[in-house]
Image (cartoon, grey):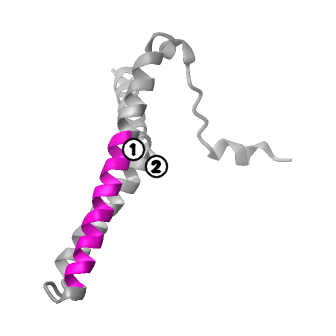
Amino acid sequence: MDASWTDQFDIYVIDLSVLEGMDWALVVGSIVGTLLSVAAMVYWLYKLLLGLWQMSAGRASFNDRAYWIRMLVVLLLIMAAMSGLWFIIIAQLLDSIQLSLAKGVSTT
């Protein structure tokens, strides 16, 4: 097999020695993040059901475009927070900053 196709994948190795003293902070942070994500999702479902109830009662319109866009954007933000997408984005930004700094140091 040709090994060149494996060069296309980025492999991230986690240095666990950095995290040895941070176990308690990671556990507390993950508990807080999980509780906030679940609370945000429950609140979003409450607002969705409340909006649907108002629409069925005739107090609001089903064609309220701003309501549906707002609910979709908030749902996407909640799902991004629950899936850990923010950590991937931050890791990519930090990697690109580190690469640009390494290139700047090597050229001077």
Residue ID at (78%, 43%) = 3
* The furthest residue to the left: 59
Residue 90: x percent and y percent? 37, 38
> Is label 2 in contact with label 1 (beta carbons under 8 Å)?
no
Label 1: which secondary element: helix
Give the residues drawn in magenta, as a range. Answer: 35-55
Q: Quadrant of residue 52?
A: bottom left
Q: Does residue 58 appear anywhere in the picture?
A: yes
Q: Quadrant of residue 30?
A: top left
Residue ID at (33%, 64%) = 45
Q: According to the image, label 1 marks what residue?
A: 89
Prevailing SS of the magenta stretch:
helix
Classify 11 as above or below 22: below
Q: Earlier in the sequence, mark 2 or mark 1?
A: 2
Residue ID at (72%, 48%) = 5
At label 1, which amino acid type do we have?
Answer: Ile
Residue 91: x percent and y percent? 42, 36
Residue closest to the eye, 69 or 15: 69
Q: Quadrant of the C terminus?
A: top left
Residue closest to the eye, 90 or 7: 90
Q: Quadrant of residue 72?
A: bottom left
Q: Does residue 93 appear anywhere in the picture?
A: no
Q: According to the image, label 2 marks what residue?
A: 83
Left/right of residue 62 with respect to residue 45 in the rendered view: left
* Residue neighbourhood size for the residue with mark 1, other residues' Cα within 10 Å, grouped as few (<14), some (14–19), many (≥20): few
Tell whether position 44 is magenta. yes
Residue 96: x percent and y percent? 39, 37
